[in-house]
């Protein structure tokens, strides 16, 4: 059996997947449009337009797994960027026979009353959630038709090393290190699940390797929910720093900004994540793969270290 793995995307999940696989001695290829060098030893880096199904198919030839770790940062471009990329990935998986392992998120569920569990309907009303739901539905349909082998893992908001300004906690760290007020969306006192990117990578690799896991989605094992305020307090404590004042961005201000700033409009559509409890159930994946989340104190240290390295 091939031990060649092709990873599309060199963001925090893609880098962790590459590092874990390379550490196990696998043949690892990381493909990005620019050929970004992750700095990980024994990893091959290639420049590739992943929306080109033919080029992507050639890159995936002989691969055991094709990992979708892409994550366009600009929400305003998702409707243009994701469909051709998702189509090319499905085509490449079918042509190559590689397992198609997808890094998903919780957007497809939309606003949920209660704990999020696998099996909930993908009922999002915003365009980002509907788009991600359609991507999984298309992959699941191809899997069910016997054309590919597909699996998706979904985690909550990322913490850990390498998340940087895209993380709701890590983006607060640079200013908080200087004693400045931390401004957050929604409420600061509601229970919220945070997922370490390393645990996303561990779960994605395990789900891809285990044939009985294919054809469905899994929630990434994550630590017990905490609040935005406590999460930042714990990260700062891991650096030996005191907590700073935390204030919430008024909903009215966010709503007004969304009328004129496209990116704020995209964030406003997701504001339900911060105005009600946002809690993930991960028991199924823990049982299936025997994975426990990285201990919370270590997660906080990894988050802090990532921001120190970025400074």
Image (cartoon, rainbow, N blue to C red):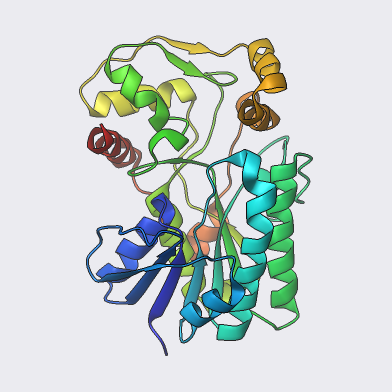
Q: Where is residue 262 in the image (x, y as percent from the top left)?
A: 66, 29
Quarter holding the N terminus is bottom left
> Number of labelled discs?
0
Q: In which quarter of the image is residue 19?
A: bottom left
Q: Quadrant of residue 277?
A: top right
* Residue 291 visible in image: no
When the figure is inspected, residue 25 is found, relative to residue 234, above or below; the finding is: below
- State left or right for residue 304 relative to residue 87: left
When the figure is inspected, residue 128 is found, relative to residue 186, above or below; the finding is: below
Q: Position of residue 49 (x, y in %)?
A: 52, 65
Residue placed most toward the observer, 73 or 276: 73
When the figure is inspected, residue 200 is found, relative to residue 127, above or below; the finding is: below
Residue at 45 percent across and 59 percent down: it is 9
* Residue 68 visible in image: yes
- State left or right for residue 113 relative to residue 104: right
Residue farthest bottom in this picture: 1
Residue at 64 percent across and 39 percent down: it is 76
- State left or right for residue 182 relative to residue 212: left
Q: Where is residue 29 in the image (x, y as percent from the top left)?
A: 37, 72
Quarter holding the C terminus is top left
Q: Position of residue 155 (x, y in %)?
A: 53, 48
Residue placed most toward the observer, 11 or 246: 11
When the figure is inspected, residue 105 is found, relative to residue 255, above or below; the finding is: below
Q: Quadrant of residue 110?
A: top right
Residue at 75 percent across and 71 percent down: it is 141
């Amino acid at each position: 059996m091939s031990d060649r793995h092709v990873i599309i995307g060199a963001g925090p999940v893609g880098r962790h997947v590459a590092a874990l696989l390379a550490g196990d001695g696998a043949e690892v290829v990381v493909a990005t449009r620019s050929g970004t060098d992750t700095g990980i030893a024994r990893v091959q880096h290639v420049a590739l337009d992943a929306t080109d199904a033919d080029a992507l198919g050639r890159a995936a030839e002989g691969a055991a797994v094709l990992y979708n770790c892409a994550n366009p940062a600009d929400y305003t471009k998702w409707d243009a960027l994701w469909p051709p990329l998702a189509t090319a990935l499905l085509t490449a998986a079918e042509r190559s026979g590689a397992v198609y392992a997808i890094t998903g998120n919780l957007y497809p569920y939309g606003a949920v009353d209660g704990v999020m569990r696998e099996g909930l309907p993908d009922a999002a009303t915003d365009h980002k959630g509907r788009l991600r739901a359609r991507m999984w539905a298309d992959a699941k349909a191809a899997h069910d038709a016997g054309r590919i082998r597909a699996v998706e893992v979904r985690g909550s908001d990322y913490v850990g090393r390498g998340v940087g300004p895209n993380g709701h906690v890590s983006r607060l760290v640079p200013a908080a290190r200087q004693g400045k007020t931390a401004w957050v969306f929604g409420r600061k006192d509601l229970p919220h699940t945070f997922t370490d990117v390393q645990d996303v990578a561990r779960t994605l690799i395990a789900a891809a390797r285990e044939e009985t896991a294919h054809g469905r989605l899994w929630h990434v094992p994550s630590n017990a929910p905490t609040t935005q305020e406590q999460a930042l307090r714990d990260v700062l404590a891991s650096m030996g720093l005191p907590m700073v004042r935390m204030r919430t961005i008024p909903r009215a201000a966010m709503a007004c900004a969304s009328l004129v700033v496209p990116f704020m409009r995209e964030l406003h559509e997701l504001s339900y994540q911060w105005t009600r409890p946002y809690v993930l159930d991960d028991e199924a994946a823990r049982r299936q793969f025997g994975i426990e989340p990285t201990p919370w104190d270590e997660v906080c240290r990894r988050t802090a270290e990532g921001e120190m390295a970025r400074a």
